[in-house]
Image: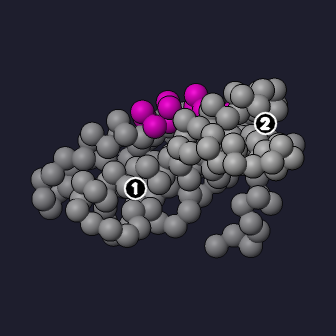
Amino acid sequence: MPSQSRAAQVDLSTTPYYHCVSRCVRRAFLCGEDPYTGQSYEHRKGWIVDKLRSLSTSFAVDVCAYAVMSNHFHVVLRVDAERAASWSDEEVLGRYGKLFKGAKAQLEALSEEARGERLALFRARLSDLSWMMRVLNESVARRANKEDGCTGRFWEGRFKSQPLLDEAGLVTCMGYVDLN
């Protein structure tokens, strides 16, 4: 377990690139064929690919590389906080509203000052690695649990992230992910 919070570990002034990994629990299959039951879970790879594609249109985070394995996935992400800062309030609300229903109604109930603060929060979340991974992992976990007919955790805790501090590290990591 890391001794620092994730907020302290992710420092966009040092690097915008991060290698993230999420692993399944209870011998659950994310992708591939279960040798004990013979059931195929290959279609779940499409869930992750489709969700990454969708999230990259809402978040100010670029997907550089990904690999979906039998019980985990890797993704290399680039966080672009400057892009999120350049969005108008309407664009922030539109992007956030695609992800979270009721965002517009939530803003309408607030005073003008509180509305500005909430939009700033939405903007920050749209350029936050943890929020993107949260949305990705939650949607996949809900679908997998429904398909498996079970409840509870699908992922082994929170995702792991590693900053990629230089170009050599980025290229090496992307090669590793690609080879998976």
Where does the N terminus fall, quadrant-wise?
bottom right
- Residue 54 visible in rendering: yes
Residue 27 on image: x %, y %: 31, 66
Q: Residues within 10 Å of mark 2 (few under 14, many from 20)?
A: some
User: Does 118 sit left or right of 34 as displayed?
Assistant: right
Please determine whether, in this image, residue 57 is positioned above or below residue 166: above
Q: Which residue is mark 1?
A: 141
Q: Which residue is mark 2?
A: 81
Please determine whether, in this image, residue 74 is positioned above or below residue 55: below
- Any magenta on residue 59? yes
Residue at mark 2 to residue at mark 1: CA–CA distance: 27 Å
* SS for callout 2: helix
Q: Residues within 10 Å of mark 1 (few under 14, many from 20)?
A: some
Where does the C terminus fall, quadrant-wise?
top left
Q: Label 1 amino acid?
A: Ala
Q: Label 2 amino acid?
A: Ala
Residue 8 on image: x %, y %: 80, 60
Image quarter of residue 132: top right
Q: Which mark is residue 160?
A: none
For the magenta stretch, what is the residue range? 49-60
> Along the line of sight, which residue is nearer the eye, 108 or 9?
108
Residue 91 on image: x %, y %: 70, 27
Instruction: Say whether marks 2 and 1 touch (CB < 8 Å).
Output: no
> Along the line of sight, which residue is nearer the eye, 43 or 3?
43
